[in-house]
Image (tube, helix red, strand yellow):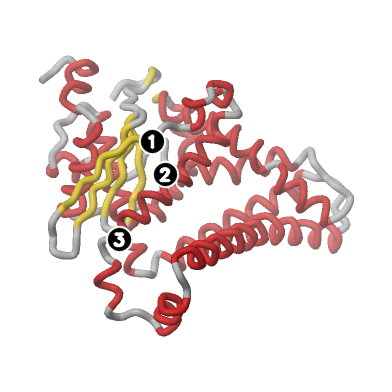
Amino acid sequence: MRKNCKKIYSGIGGQAVLEGIMMKNKSEYAVAVRKPDGEIVVKKDTYTMLQEKYKILSIPFVRGIFSMVDSLILGTKTLEYSASFIDDVESESESKIDKWLNDHLNEKTMGIVMGITTVISVFVALFVFAAVPAGIGSLIKKIFSIKGNFLIAFVEGITRIFIFIVYIKLISRMDEIKRTFEYHGSEHKCINCIENGWDLNVENVMKASKEHKRCGTSFLVYVMMISIFLFMFINPPTLKLKFLSRVILIPVVAGISYEVLRLMGRFDNKLVDIISRPGMWMQGLTTHEPDEKEVEVAIKAVEAVFDWKKFKRENFGVT
């Protein structure tokens, strides 16, 4: 691979879904899912990002916020599609709570319940990743009578990272999550295979790295790291104001982190390698080595939206 130069950038990205992969290239995306009977189904569609609809949203440090919104919208949509293939299988072992909900609530009411659940989940996430670290930082500051902001911001950041690692470790014990992390690995392997100039086949994909610098996991790591430096300069007098400031500044941190992620994915040199290393390390938790069947699914998703042979000819001068 070239050194100290611009990286060969394919422009494709995606995410793992239940028993499959979603891959996106410009406005086109494809979801490939392996059904319980072993068949691979591929659904191709289009999704226009907000910053493409409204050019003002493509401004640097603003586009990252709306890119995150787009990822949540498309990610939820494709997850629901992939889940539809396992609903029938799981219905036989349906829990009593699920059965009661399905028997007593209509589709509209279920939508309201799901909306409330989502809102509650957001508040829980804000509490865990914003309120808890802020509270711990304030407590340490009070106990040890610390005057400076640097140490407190560092403690907050380390607490967030610790909570994130514990959370990933806990959910990775679930079989469904383990397989999703394997599909996550197959997504990265396919992109790395293409950007290395290799033919996209199972053998080559299996040899490629399961870590990639443009991964969403790296984005979260940048968010946590950048928040440490940003919050060094913001020291509200009360815990309530500190928590509020952390929440309000989430878009600012996300916007900066997105720009860093873009740069890391487009260049290949020693400085980029150093800055990318924490995110790549964290990907060790969220990506697992896939098997060949999972790679087959990922390849199907890629080929539905991306002409890798043309990309290879244009960027590597070979057929």
In front of the other: 302 or 112: 112
**Which x, y percent locates residue 20?**
26, 53
**Which x, y percent locates residue 189?**
26, 42
In front of the other: 306 or 253: 306
Callout 1, which amino acid? Tyr
Residue linked to disc 2: 74
The quarter in which the N terminus is drawn is top left
**Helix, strand or loop status at disc 3:** loop
The tag earlier along the polypeptide, 2 or 3, is: 2
**Which x, y percent locates residue 137?**
76, 57
Q: Are marks 1 and 3 in contact (CB under 8 Å)?
A: no
Q: Are marks 2 and 1 in contact (CB under 8 Å)?
A: yes
Callout 2, which amino acid? Leu
Residue linked to disc 1: 47
Please tell me how crowded label 2 is: few (under 14), some (14-19), or many (20+) other residues with Cα within 10 Å. Answer: some
Residue linked to disc 3: 84
